Amino acid sequence: MQASDRFNINSQLEHLQAKYVGTGHADMNRFEWAVNIQRDSYASYVGHYPMLAYFGIAENESMGRERYNFMQKMLLPCGLPPEREDD
């Protein structure tokens, strides 16, 4: 592998990270990553009718109520963020 190949791969990765928030970046902490994963999952559940129907049947709730619950969970999917230690 040559240096130009390594640079090309890194530039492609940086481009993907800038384009798609969920792919993360070097300064992302564990909490931010978990929040992205949870929000992406909830958005997928709301956006895919069969998944929403599955959750509605499993929890004996209407699909509208399930959609509302998932939207509410997207606000703080992992609870409050941890305290930051300022250097």
Image: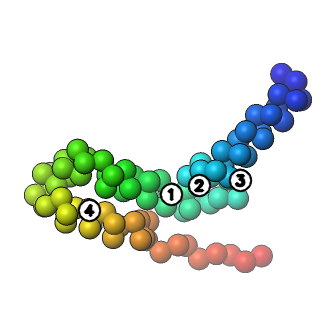
- Answer whether labels 2 and 3 touch (C-beta < 8 Å): no
Element at badge 2?
A: helix
Q: CA distance from mark 2 to mark 3?
A: 12 Å
Q: Do callouts 2 and 1 mark residues in contact (Cβ within 8 Å)?
A: yes
Q: Which mark sits nearer the N-terminus, 2 or 3? A: 2
> Residue 32 at x, y = what percent?
56, 62
**Residue 58 x/y as whole percent:** 14, 51
Which of the two marks, 4 or 3, is nearer to us in this view?
4
User: Which label's residue is closer to the chain start, 4 or 3?
Assistant: 3
Cα–Cα gap, marks 2 and 1: 8 Å
Q: Which residue is mark 4?
A: 67
Mark 3 sits on what residue? 26
Residue under pointer 1: 36
How far from the left and from the top, in percent, is residue 12?
73, 39
Q: Amino acid at mark 4?
A: Arg
Camera-near label (1 vs 4) is 4
